[in-house]
Image (cartoon, helix red, strand yellow):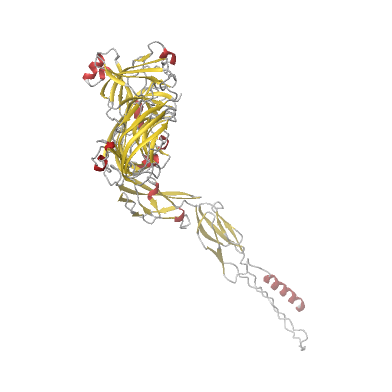
């Protein structure tokens, strides 16, 4: 009986020791076994009874708790947990985890929590012993857009050109990380105004500075407002005239550049020659500033105003008016040949040379330009533009623009054939049922002419119908009825233009050439008719390269006449005598030019003036009593001295050109004649009197010749008595 008890006791003890808590290994139980080899003592057995065995004590789990390193997470975040099982000596401290909402967060076997979606959920720990539970509440936030942190003040006021240090503005992502360096900052009104945290604007108006940040979770945009005041107060009110489409219905559009680069003119500038500025250079508010030097040389380099392309009255004759203020800012080389034009695809445009070269720098001028009788083609692009023909450094401000379209009396355009012009009596355009387009010309009814005296003359003349063509403005007016398509080279042409005039100063016929130049039709004579009207008549031979008649009012902004009819007839030319040139000139024919025939000139590069009684010049009797004073202020300049007219100097003919001149100031540089594209030298440029006499064989038909200072050539002053051209030999 006693010997069977011990094994049973040991077995129970070992069973108890075998219980394991999760992550906690109980301490193994040890037994006191006799040491091998110990001395043996004999014990006398007693006769007492063996005691009953005792049951071992088991410690159960009473509670469990769980904590997390972070209880607020963003989607994708993870966090660790800590579990506490009590009491510490519980036999079975094992446990497991679960989530109440796996759409919000999940938990792994080692207690790692992973945020899955926005919301809240409990992460639960549960013991194996007794099923005790502990919970921790986890909040999961969705990833959010970045945030821009704005200052309290978001509106500022500065003047044009005044620097403003912008306030510190930062951006953070949804985790609170600083992402300011990724933020885009831009002035939506003037791109160049913001740089390195400093705002400095050249354009007056309300500037909106955008602060923009974006990442995978969204975007944020905030704004500062900076009110920029102009140097010169805006004085031009556009009122209700803010829609360029108004031209389509013969209305008015105005532009003062108050909206800076967002003006409605749709300006195109291939050369970087235009900018908007509200500083000292401006006229009022903001102005368009043009670097004329960058637009020089070709209409292709102009400042193009494209807003009206869709609003011209296509295919019909209309009057287009443009008015504006302008201010010359610098004029190192003169603003001569600075144009405002209306053009379209494939055309040379209708050009108005508007700048008053006598205007002082900084002086505000006003200009009204009328493009009458303009027929914009039904297809293609059309535009207004500003551009400079000649090279040179000059800047100009333009502001307060008004564009207007005016409906015109329509005429039936007729383009006769060569055969019709060659028929007996030729062809007559009456400006009504046999009409023709003339650039910058407008068809009007005689009854609408304001000048009563001129109206009476027209109403009483058989050379007029009830419709006339009104021409206004300086320079050219291209006549569509007579072109390269009906001109016949070698034929004798007679052109008669019947008209009355308010101002016909500098009235010429010019025949345009295919190379873009023009040939003045010399010998054209205006005569008075018995009915009070006038007729300008020219007779001559049509030359190769002529392409269109131009009715010219050279450099006369007040040019104003009414054309009742134009008569043109072509006939065979008379035989050329053996002893004459094709133009009919005999050897010995002499032309003398004692003054500049194209009128006065005085700009930054050159000047022609009347004689100033220089005693040294008067001492030379060959210089006469009234020589002209010529000054080249810079090299590579031309002074157009002689308008020969109708190619007086003819190809292959030999001429003697004679000139007496006196040089008073000289840099020693060279100068020459300029005969169209030829450059014959005429003499030295040293100080003193010189007689020049050269033999010249014309390399082509010469329409004009000039004095020309070569590149890096003559700069100085000389006096000219007269230039004489004599035909000395024929070449047949």
Q: Please state which of residues 704 and 275 is positioned toward the viewer in this rendering.
A: 704
Q: Quadrant of the N terminus?
A: bottom right
Residue 30 position in % (x across, y down): 69, 77
Q: Please state which of residues 101 and 278 is positioned toward the viewer in this rendering.
A: 278
Residue 698 position in % (x across, y down): 42, 30
Tell me what residue is drawn at x 50 percent, y 60 percent: 71
User: In the figure, residue 29 lies in which quadrant?
Assistant: bottom right
User: In the figure, residue 495 lies in which quadrant?
Assistant: top left
Tell me what residue is drawn at x 56 percent, y 65 percent: 83
Residue at the extreme left: 453
Residue at the extreme top: 424
Residue 595 makes an appearance in the image: yes
Residue 305 makes an appearance in the image: no
Q: Please state which of residues 699 and 201 is positioned toward the viewer in this rendering.
A: 699
Q: Please state which of residues 365 and 99 is positioned toward the viewer in this rendering.
A: 365
Q: Is residue 76 above or below residue 20?
A: above
Q: Is residue 306 above or below residue 99?
A: above
Tell me what residue is drawn at x 63 percent, y 67 percent: 21
Residue 37 position in % (x across, y down): 78, 86
Q: Is residue 313 above or below residue 83?
A: above
Residue 36 position in % (x across, y down): 77, 84
């Amino acid at each position: 009986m006693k010997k069977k008890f011990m094994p049973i006791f040991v077995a129970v003890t070992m069973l108890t020791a075998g219980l394991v808590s999760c992550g906690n290994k109980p301490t193994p139980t040890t037994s006191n076994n006799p040491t091998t080899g110990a001395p043996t003592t004999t014990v006398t057995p007693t006769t007492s009874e063996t005691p009953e065995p005792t049951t071992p004590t088991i410690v159960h789990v009473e509670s469990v708790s769980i904590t997390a390193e972070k209880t607020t997470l963003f989607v994708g975040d993870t966090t660790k947990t800590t579990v506490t099982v009590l009491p510490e000596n519980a036999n079975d401290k094992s446990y497991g985890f679960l989530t109440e909402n796996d759409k919000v967060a999940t938990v792994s076997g080692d207690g790692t929590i992973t945020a899955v979606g926005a919301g809240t959920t409990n992460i639960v720990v549960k013991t194996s012993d007794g099923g005790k539970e502990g919970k921790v509440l986890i909040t999961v936030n969705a990833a959010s857009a970045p945030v821009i942190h704005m200052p309290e003040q978001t509106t500022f006021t500065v003047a044009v050109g005044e620097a403003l240090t912008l306030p510190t503005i930062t951006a953070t992502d949804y985790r609170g990380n600083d992402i300011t360096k990724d933020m885009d900052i831009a002035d939506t009104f003037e791109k160049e105004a913001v740089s390195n945290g400093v705002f400095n604007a050249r354009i007056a108006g309300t500037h909106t500075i955008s602060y923009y940040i974006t990442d995978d979770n969204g975007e944020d945009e905030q704004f500062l407002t900076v009110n920029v005041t102009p140097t010169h107060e805006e004085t031009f009110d556009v009122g209700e005239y803010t829609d360029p489409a108004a031209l389509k219905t013969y209305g008015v559009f105005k532009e003062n550049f108050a909206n800076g680069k967002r003006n409605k003119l749709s300006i195109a500038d291939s050369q970087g020659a235009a900018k908007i500025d509200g500083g000292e250079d401006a006229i009022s508010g903001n102005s368009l500033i043009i670097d004329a030097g960058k637009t020089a040389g070709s209409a292709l380099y102009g400042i193009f105003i494209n807003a009206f392309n869709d609003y011209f009255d296509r295919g019909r004759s209309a009057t287009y008016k443009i008015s504006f203020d302008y201010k010359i800012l610098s004029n190192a080389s003169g603003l001569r040949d600075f144009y405002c034009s209306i053009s379209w695809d494939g055309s040379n445009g209708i050009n108005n040379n508007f700048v008053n070269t006598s205007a002082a720098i900084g002086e505000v001028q006003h200009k009204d330009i009328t493009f009458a009788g303009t027929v914009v083609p039904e297809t293609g692009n059309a535009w207004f533009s500003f551009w400079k023909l000649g090279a040179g450094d000059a800047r100009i401000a333009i502001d307060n623009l008004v564009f207007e379209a005016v409906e015109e009396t329509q005429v039936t355009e007729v383009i006769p054939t060569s055969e019709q012009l060659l028929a007996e009596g030729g062809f007559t355009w009456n400006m009504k049922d046999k009409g023709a387009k003339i650039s910058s010309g407008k068809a009007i009814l005689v009854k609408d002419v304001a000048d009563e005296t001129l109206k009476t003359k027209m109403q009483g003349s058989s050379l007029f119908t009830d419709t006339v063509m009104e021409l206004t403005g300086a320079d050219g007016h291209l006549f569509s009825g007579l072109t390269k398509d009906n001109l016949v080279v070698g034929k004798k042409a007679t052109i008669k233009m019947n008209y009355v005039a308010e101002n016909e100063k500098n009235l010429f016929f010019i025949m345009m050439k295919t190379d873009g130049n023009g040939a003045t039709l010399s010998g054209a004579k205006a005569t008075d008719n018995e009915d009070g009207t006038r007729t300008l008549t020219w007779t001559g031979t049509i030359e190769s390269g002529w392409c269109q008649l131009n009715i010219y009012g050279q450099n006369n902004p007040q040019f104003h006449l009414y054309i009742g009819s134009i008569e043109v007839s072509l006939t065979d030319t008379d035989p050329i005598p053996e002893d004459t040139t094709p133009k009919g000139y005999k050897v010995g024919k002499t032309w003398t030019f004692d003054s500049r025939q194209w009128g006065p000139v005085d700009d930054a590069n050159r000047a022609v003036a009347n004689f100033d009684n220089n005693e040294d010049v008067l001492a030379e009797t060959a210089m006469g009593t009234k020589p002209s004073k010529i000054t080249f202020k810079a090299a590579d300049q031309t002074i157009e001295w002689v308008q020969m007219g109708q190619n007086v100097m003819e190809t292959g003919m030999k001429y003697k050109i004679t000139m007496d001149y006196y040089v008073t100031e000289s840099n020693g540089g060279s100068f020459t004649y300029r005969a169209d594209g030829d450059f014959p030298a005429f003499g030295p440029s040293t100080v003193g009197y010189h007689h020049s006499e050269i033999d010249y064989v014309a390399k082509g038909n010469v329409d004009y010749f000039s004095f020309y200072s070569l590149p890096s050539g003559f700069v100085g002053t000389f006096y000219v008595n007269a230039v004489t051209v004599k035909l000395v030999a024929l070449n047949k």
